[in-house]
Every structure is written in structure tokens, then in C-alpha cells.
Image (spheres, rainbow, N blue to C red):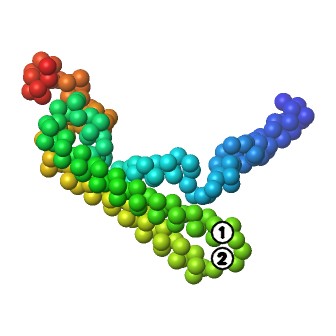
Amino acid sequence: MSVHLTKSLALAIALVPIAAFSQDHGHGSNTAPYAGFETREIKSLSEQDIAELQRGGGWGLALPAELNGHPGPAHLLDLQTELELSAEQVGTITATYKTMRIAAIAAGERLIAAEAAISNAFAQPGLSEETLRSLLAEAGKARTELRFIHLSRHLSTPELLSDAQIQQYNILRGYADDPCTSVPEGHNRDLWRRHNGCD
């Protein structure tokens, strides 16, 4: 191998980390994840976030309940036909959903206002740590209340449903495999389906 080729290879190898760094830390989209956020009226909330909060939507706040066998009232009503909910079940769940939504809209508006106050405070000079702490406490209080509203309604749904309905809910929502289509290896398909009440 010539001295010239050896030097060229050494230079190329030496430049690899620099090239990799420039790709990872250049001016691509990966280095500016918040680009465009500066035009938001409330910097910490997107238009979609605000719309979700204003309509009393879940905003992902009830995931610990939803993913642990405590169905959400809104989703139960959406799936009432598939779950074969009785008229009594639908009536109770509808009432739960309506009261939850009213409370969630009010709490959501408080959270929006609190986040707007934080955003506005940083847009002005002279924000003190004491004021910031107070603003954050207000926002935290609003968020906690909103989360409680959603999670607490999930607490009441399991007692309204049968085990089979909860299992079917988890299947329909994609949290569990359908036993009628997922026969474990080594099991007789017909016996398995009969045991699990499959048609």
C-alpha cells in the first residue's frame, strides 16, 4: 500500500466522527424539535392540545387506568354495540361521562389559563423565581384536578361491567389478543374456541 493511499485512508477515518457529528448536530429537523412553536399563542400547548382540553377530552391523562383494566366511559359508549351493553349500563355510563365532561372542560380551561400565564410571564422582563413558583403551582394544581377528574371516572366502570365485557373491551382497544383468533401453540383449535365461547 502506498504512503499516499495510507495517508488518505487515515484522513478519511479521522473525519468520520466529524461527519457523523455534523449529521446529528447540524441544522436538520432533529436539532430543532421546537421549530414553529414560537408562533404558538401558548408556548406549551398546541392548537390540538387546546381543542382537546376545551372539549373535555382525555388528553392521555387516564392511561394508567385505561391500560390496567379500567375502561373509559367515552370509549365504552363508542363500543356499546360490540360490548352488548344493556340499556341500564348505557344509562349509567352516559351519566358518568356527562358529569366527567362538564368537570373536565372547566378544569381544562383553568389549565389553559395557567399555561397562558406562564407563557406570558416569560414574554415579559423581570420574572422572579417566587412568581414563577406560584405560576407553576397553579398550573400543577389545575393539571392534577383535571387528571383526577378523568382517572376517578375510570374507577367506577369495572363494577358496571362483566369480566367478559372488560376482556372484550381490551381486545377491541388493542390491549389484548383475541382468544378466538389467537390459539396458543399446542392447543386444539376447536376445543380452545369452544372453551373461550367463540362462535
Pick the residue in front: 151 or 103.
Answer: 103
Q: Residue at x 83, y 41 (%)?
A: 11
Q: Is residue 85 left or right of residue 46?
A: left
Tag 1's secondary structure? helix
Cα gap from disc 2 to disc 1, whole angstroms: 7 Å
* Residue placed under numbered mark 2 in the picture: 127
Residue 167 image offset from top left, x and y in percent? 20, 38
User: Could you tell me the amino acid type at mark 2?
Assistant: Leu
106 to 181, vertically: above or below: below
* Identity, as a three-letter code, of the amino acid under mark 1: Phe
Residue marked by disc 1: 122
- Residue 17 seen by the camera: no
- The spot of residue 128 in percent (x, y) is 63, 80
Q: Vertically, is 37 above or below 143?
A: above
* Left or right side of 146 for 32: right
Dividing the picture into quadrants, the one containing residue 103 is bottom left
Instruction: Identify the residue at image location x=68%, y=43%.
Output: 29
